[in-house]
C-alpha cells in the first residue's frame, strides 16, 4: 500500500472514531431522564400572587393557580408567564370528572393539564367563557378562542 493512501485511511478511521465518540457522548448527555425535582423555579416576578405554583421544565414554564368549585366540576384558574404577564384568568371546565387530590402538570392560555393522583390519569381543563389576559379579554369555548358571543 502506498504511504499516502495508508495515511489517508488512518486519518479517516481516526476521524470516524472521534465523531462516533462525540455522538455517544451527546447521546448520553441528552438522554438523561427528566426529573421535575431537578427544576428550580425562576425568581417570582412582581405581580405573581404567592399562591401560584411554578409548572415548568428546563426550557421555561408558567405560574398557575386553580381553585376548584362546585365539587371539582369547575375551576377558577389564573396563569402567569415567567416575567409576570397575565396569560389567562377565568373559568376552566374539566374534560372528565376530577378526583382529588390532583397535581398541576402543564398550563397555557386555553388549557391546563392536571394529574389525578388517585387514578394516575391526566385530566385536561379547558377555558370556557370570557378569559382575561394582559391586553384584554377573549371569549373561549372548549379551550379555544371564538369570535364574538
Image (cartoon, rainbow, N blue to C red):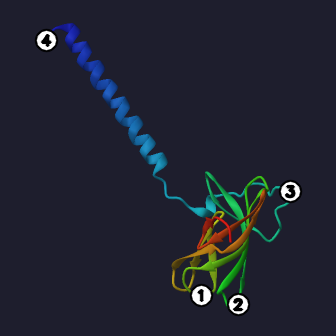
Residue 51 position, x and y percent, is: 80, 71
Q: Residue at x 62, y 70 (%)?
A: 112
**Pointer 1 residue:** 99
Quadrant where the image shows the N terminus: top left
34 left or right, relative to 59: left
Residue most toward the front?
A: 148
**Pointer 4 residue:** 1
Evaluate if marks 3 and 4 touch, with contact meaning CB atoms under 8 Å apart. no
Element at badge 3?
loop
Q: Residue at x 38, y 36 (%)?
A: 21
94 left or right, relative to 63: left
Q: Nearer the viewer, residue 40 or 110?
A: 110
**Which mark's residue is nearer the viewer, 4 or 2?**
2
Question: Residue 81, located in which quarter of the rendered image?
Answer: bottom right
Evaluate if marks 2 and 3 touch, with contact meaning CB atoms under 8 Å apart. no
| Mark 3 → mark 1, Cα distance in angstroms | 33 Å
Question: Residue 8, located in which quarter of the rendered image?
Answer: top left
| Mark 3 → mark 4, Cα distance in angstroms | 72 Å
Evaluate if marks 1 and 4 touch, with contact meaning CB atoms under 8 Å apart. no
Residue 12 position, x and y percent, is: 28, 22
Dot 2 alpha-carbon crowd within 10 angstroms: few under 14, some 14 to 19, many 20 or more:
few
**Pointer 3 residue:** 46
**Pointer 2 residue:** 70
Q: Is residue 106 visible?
A: no
State which tag comes first along the sequence, 2 or 3: 3
| 13 shown above or below 71 | above
| Mark 4 → mark 2, Cα distance in angstroms | 84 Å
State which tag comes first along the sequence, 2 or 1: 2
Q: Is residue 140 visible?
A: yes
Element at badge 4?
loop
Quadrant where the image shows the C terminus: bottom right
Amino acid at each position: 500500500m502506498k504511504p499516502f493512501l495508508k495515511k489517508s485511511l488512518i486519518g479517516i478511521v481516526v476521524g470516524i472514531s472521534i465523531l462516533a465518540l462525540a455522538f455517544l457522548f451527546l447521546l448520553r448527555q441528552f438522554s438523561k431522564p427528566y426529573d421535575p425535582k431537578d427544576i428550580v423555579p425562576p425568581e417570582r416576578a412582581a405581580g405573581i400572587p404567592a399562591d401560584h405554583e411554578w409548572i415548568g421544565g428546563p426550557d421555561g414554564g408558567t405560574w398557575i393557580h386553580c381553585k376548584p368549585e362546585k365539587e371539582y366540576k369547575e375551576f377558577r384558574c389564573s396563569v402567569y408567564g415567567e416575567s409576570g404577564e397575565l396569560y389567562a384568568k377565568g373559568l376552566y371546565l374539566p374534560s372528565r370528572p376530577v378526583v382529588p387530590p390532583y397535581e398541576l402538570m402543564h398550563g397555557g392560555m386555553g388549557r391546563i393539564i392536571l394529574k389525578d393522583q388517585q387514578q394516575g390519569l391526566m385530566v385536561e381543563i379547558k377555558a370556557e367563557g370570557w378569559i382575561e389576559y394582559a391586553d384584554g379579554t377573549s371569549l373561549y369555548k372548549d379551550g379555544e378562542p371564538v369570535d364574538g358571543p
